[in-house]
Amino acid sequence: MPTSTQVAVGPLAHAGSVLDGAQLMAENPYRPWEARITSITPLTENEKLFEFRLIDERIRDAFHHEPGQFVEVSIFGVGEAPISISSSPSKSGFIELCVRRMGEFTTRLHQMQCGDIVGLRGPYGRPFPFDDMRGHDVLLVAGGLGIAPLRSLINNIHDERSDFGNVTIIYGSKNPGEVMFREQFEMWRHRKDFDLYLTVDNPDDTWDGEVGLVTAPFAHLDVDARNTFGAICGPPVMYRFVVEEMRKKGIPYDRIYMSFERHMKCGMGKCGHCQVGHQYCCIDGPVFNYWEAKNIQGSM
Amino acid sequence: MLYRVIDAHELPALVQAFMCDYEVIAPVRSGKSFAFEAIDSFDDIVLDYPTTLTSLKKYYLPPRETLFEYDMVDGVTDYRMEVRPRVLFGAHACDINAINALNLVFEDPRYPDPYYEAHKKATMIVGISCMPGDSCFCHLLDAGEVRSGYDLFLADIGGRYLVSIGSVEGADILEAACDPREATDEDRRAFRDYTRRRQRAFNEDIPSVQEIPMLMDAFHSDDFWEELGSRCLNCTACSSVCPTCYCFDIRDVLDPSGKTGRRERVWDACTSPQFALVTGGHNFRPGPRERVRHRMYHKLNGFNAKHGRYLCVGCGRCVKACKADISPIEVLRFFEQKGIEDGERDAD
Ligand SMILES: Cc1cc2nc3c(=O)[nH]c(=O)nc-3n(C[C@H](O)[C@H](O)[C@H](O)COP(=O)(O)OP(=O)(O)OC[C@H]3O[C@@H](n4cnc5c(N)ncnc54)[C@H](O)[C@@H]3O)c2cc1C
Ligand code: SF4
Ligand code: SF4
Ligand code: FES
């Protein structure tokens, strides 16, 4: 006999559910789960670091991410935006996002207060190959807001520092005022955890780091090419130049990883917005290695 | 798969049997053209209709669909959507193939789509054979015949139908309403005549091209795309009428109170200029050249890489809908022309 079908979503549908957190999230992957803002740290004039805690304990326990993945953030009544997870997976129970104020969504998020509720769904996307990187040197290159996803990787490497060889961070910004997480990075440099190169395009009187493009520090960089992974994140124009430098140092094609930004809506390989060539950035990426990227029509 | 034969005069009884328990959606006359609509009488159905203006995808992916409702302060509130059982009666092979392609996306085991699943589970499909029109080229893209994805498929073999039975549910209704019998030698001959007649009826001006995915790659930077794209009006009609275009946008809509609202998904199109635009103003497909090429590339190459089949079923709807004469047929013509040039060069 034919029967009607239905989709039920909301507190009634999941309150008495026997499903665990992972099953609840899978049951309706479009449903954002309520999360409370637990802390807000202004970083620069336009960037803030938000910390969130998922309210439903089942979801909180089931939520695990890896560096390079992102979430779809909901502001109910405004919409959704894809944002990279900026915290290390080891910081369990809390999720940090570093958000730049751009248009309507991000401006509204910047106006929110601790205790306010947003929605989160995810995590989505293919992460950086953290486990493959173990035992190797890592060269991380961030441009501007590209530091947001790379910070998750950097923090995670720092958590398990003894598993990695030399770790070098090159982080370029337009102006000194736009450099984020500087104190933490400087402290780690000071403790010889990482090599750190901060560069800016437009220095001011206080700037004591390097001046120039993010590629400038490559000139005096010693890279053990056979033992190094590269990880890149930044504005679209940056990739070609940084990849070129890494190739000149001899890092193999398939060990240069980069995170692509595209317009995204669903995060699940359905809405089509994030397509590059035959790939979906949201599920096949956003992290691709250079070899894969070369084999996607129109990717670079 | 089982095949049985029923007489043409048994068809009203079959539709009647569906009507008891299902909403019946079938091709009807609509002004000068044809459309799928809910019917309440067998007599409204036009069995030998030419391709409808719009496709069946709206029954799986409505143009506008609520995903959930919410309170702006506290988050998701209770919402329920329900799909009543229905049958799509009289779908052509290309259109069933199109739904089979959509299934690959929305039933992807990584993220099965609960809304699509609900529509699909409530929907039966009864297919019907057809004769190709001027802009049909399903046979060139492996979509001229359909081998799965229907409950029943009726092939008109003259006064009777050879019925391919695709599901138990379909078999039950067929047996309850009609008196299906096994096919005789004569029925099989009639079926063979029909398939040959149909094969010969395709428009021979539409070129048959081998290795389309390879050519899509080889000519990715050809000036052809500039010329083709420059004609595009960004109207997105092609994607609306296309049975396999599934791109969508997700939007929030506030209720008049300003305190509650709903999240919707609405059809979107990669031919729309903002489709690949990101904040800060960078557009990954800035011009019509890139957008039209992307639409074709996904249909004739990209989808193959992921799912092993074309995302164009050659239904010809966009051929008719596009005021600028942009369609996969133009791409096939371009490849054919290239092939002729190559041939001339070889002869030199
Ligand atoms: C994988 C990924 C990770 C990201 N990580 C971060 C991050 O860590 N921090 C951060 O600040 N920003 C990040 N972004 C960019 C962020 O998503 C956009 O800045 C945000 O969507 C802008 O929304 P808006 O309403 O403020 O801007 P507007 O320009 O007013 O609106 C843009 C519209 O396009 C949609 N859209 C979807 N995807 C994008 C996109 N990629 N860029 C722009 N618009 C998009 C938005 O939903 C919105 O409807 C990331 C983007 C992607 C794809
Ligand atoms: S290709 Fe044709 S139908 Fe499609 S958007 Fe362009 S003009 Fe409109
Ligand atoms: S691209 Fe055109 S011919 Fe191909 S399936 Fe879509 S509407 Fe039909
Ligand atoms: S964001 Fe929807 S397909 Fe990738």
Image (cartoon, helix red, strand yellow):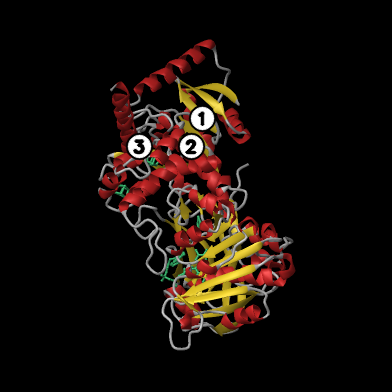
- Say if mark 1 contacts mark 2, CB within 8 Å: yes
Q: Of B338 and B54, which appears nearest the observer?
A: B338
Disc 3 residue lies near ligand 3 with CB under 8 A = yes
Q: Which chain letter matches label 1?
A: B
Q: Which residue sits at x=48%, y=55%?
A: A271
Could you say where residue B266 lies in the image, as x and y percent from the top left? 43, 58
- Label 2 CA crowd tier, 10 Å (few <14, some 14–19, many 20+): many
What is the quadrant of residue B329 in the picture?
top left
Three-letter code for the amino acid on which mark 1 is drawn: Phe
Three-letter code for the amino acid on which mark 2 is drawn: Ile
Could you say where residue A288 lies in the image, as x and y percent from the top left? 55, 55
First in sequence: mark 1 vs mark 2: 2
Residue where numbered disc 2 is placed:
B96
Query: Regarding mark 3 in the picture, which secondary structure is present there?
Result: loop
Residue where numbered disc 3 is placed:
B316
The lab-note entry on whether marks 3 and 2 share a chain reads: yes
Query: Regarding mark 1 in the picture, which secondary structure is present there?
Result: strand
Q: Which of marks 1 and 2 is in front?
A: 2
